Image (cartoon, rainbow, N blue to C red):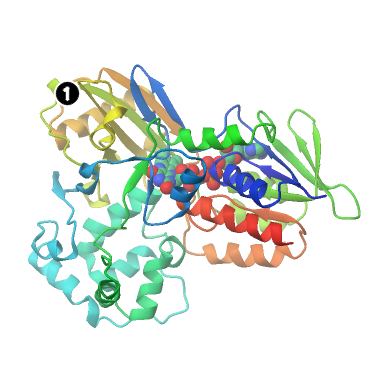
Amino acid sequence: MARVVIIGAGISGLSLAWYLKALKPEWECLILEASSRVGGKAWTVLEDGFLCEKGVNGFLTNKPSSLALAAELKLPLYPANENSKRRFVVKAGRLVKLPEKPQEFLFSSLLSPLGRLRVLLEPFIAKNTSPEDESLASFARRRLGEEAFQHLIDPMAKGIYAGNPELLSLRYCFPRIFELEQTYGSLIKAMLSLKKQAAKQGKKGPGAGPGGHLTSFEMGMSQLTDSLANHLQGHIKLDAEAVELFKATASGQWRITTRKGETIDATHVVMACPARTAASLIAPHSPALSAALNNIDYPPVTVAALGFSKGLLKHPLNGFGFLVPEKERRSILGVLWDSSIFPNRAPEGYSLLRILVGGARARELAYLKDNDLLNRVKKELQELMGIHAAPEFVRIFRWDEAIPQYNIGYGNLLSCLQQESKHLPNIHMRCNWIGGVSFNDCIANSQDLAKKLAAT
Ligand SMILES: Cc1cc2nc3c(=O)[nH]c(=O)nc-3n(C[C@H](O)[C@H](O)[C@H](O)COP(=O)(O)OP(=O)(O)OC[C@H]3O[C@@H](n4cnc5c(N)ncnc54)[C@H](O)[C@@H]3O)c2cc1C
């Protein structure tokens, strides 16, 4: 009988076990988790009445996987309120609202008249036919112009990847946008065509943003991972860091050793852990794959959660929050006005803000000592939002390896993985460094692997 051992109890590992149990209840399935909790980057804490997300804020409903999993677990959703549609970007030290609809771009002060005109030329720009991997920055400059890149695309790269758009690969970070250019030759033409097709079916076409509605759970994102863990009781081993992987028998069985010295045999091993861990486990069996995995960049991000008495804030906080383009030369990546979109995130009379610092272009800032970090953050909140009050609640959460960067050259890792997998029977990889970083992608990829494994 198959015995699947999954390394890592983040959403990738947990959802994989969930789907495997549904498809193959007779199989043995065990998750090894290095830490003393499940959830990985999904980690909600309730302290002094503030419900803080250390990592994942929520998921978008434009993809079905998180919604479907929540429905299977019978978890009621907690959608963000209408404020979540109002997003801001900093321009020349002020917050400017991002257009919600494509036509609003034409009147938005985010771009100068010339910058807007340049965007309108987009349908006349030839599509990229080079087989070379193109960076997000190069794509955006080529199709939309420098201004749109700086004020729209650069902050988007920060918001999703805390990344550097000069390095992020368009094809692997935003495969849908890559496909749209390849299929329609232009993003504007693609949008018009998709709108037309949608209208024919009585549906709404794509908008200006990523689409979908930001959604979470009343007690935060940990509610989903905790619920999965409850259903998987007896199948998760905490404080069980996998440190070694070797072939146990000539028949191809694998054996895993944990830091505590336990050994666990498996017919199938799934690495649902960060690339660095996978690299170290796989090194004796495939030095090439190990090296490729070690090449994935994971910049650090620090999250400062600050609670303010509402009476002391002059700012209306009537939106999702804001992102800061690189051009603005600020210390922070962006600010999420959590309690404005999920009102129960702060106690009555208070607001909760989460400020993100660090990422691919400002790693050193993520490592600032608490006090230095807070001083920088407070100065920027003062300058950008007019907040002079001192926060009454302060928590700082640090991720040394936050979000994997699908940088130029990422395709080499995929080729190497494909090549080396031939010599690694029944070893699989499923984590956010492959197939998408979003919660939705992690769940969809795990479901896909569960189906493949069940079919073998
Ligand atoms: C600050 C931040 C905010 C984010 N916000 C969002 C958001 O709003 N929406 C969204 O869609 N995505 C968001 N993301 C991305 C998303 O959180 C992740 O991509 C996703 O949660 C990753 O899940 P995972 O299971 O693939 O990996 P992880 O969550 O990293 O889980 C990996 C697990 O493996 C364990 N592990 C590591 N080594 C070993 C070992 N040797 N043995 C056993 N176990 C091991 C770890 O302890 C961990 O539990 C955010 C990420 C960060 C950092």
Give how far across and how far down residue 33 sits, in percent: 64, 35
Give how far across and how far down residue 10 sits, in percent: 56, 40
Q: Locate residue 395 relative to residue 222 in the image: left or right.
A: left
User: Can you tell me whether the CB of the residue at mark 1 lies under 8 Å from the nearest atom of ligand 1?
Assistant: no
Residue at position x 17%, y 57% in the image: 99
The vertical placement of 271 against 257, above or below, is below
Give how far across and how far down residue 132 sits, in percent: 47, 75
Extreme right residue here? 250
Residue at position x 24%, y 70% in the image: 144
Q: Locate residue 97 relative to residue 267 in the image: left or right.
A: left
Residue at position x 68%, y 49% in the image: 270
* Residue type, label 1: Lys
Circle 1 — which element?
Answer: helix
Whether residue 363 appears in this view of the structure is: no
Which residue occupies the foreground of this view, 191 or 334? 191
The vertical placement of 365 against 455, above or below, is above
Whether residue 94 appears in this view of the structure is: yes
Specify the quadrant that holds the C terminus: bottom right
Q: Locate residue 5 relative to residue 395 in the image: left or right.
A: right
The vertical placement of 417 against 438, above or below, is below
Give how far across and how far down residue 396 sits, in percent: 38, 26
Q: Locate residue 388 relative to residue 8 in the image: left or right.
A: left
Which residue occupies the foreground of this view, 240 or 24? 24
Q: Quadrant of residue 245?
A: top right
Residue denoted by label 1: 310
Residue at position x 47%, y 78% in the image: 131
Which residue occupies the foreground of this view, 270 or 275? 270
Classed neighbour count for the residue bearing mark 1: other residues with Cα under 10 Å, few (<14), some (14–19), many (≥20):
some
**Total numbered labels:** 1
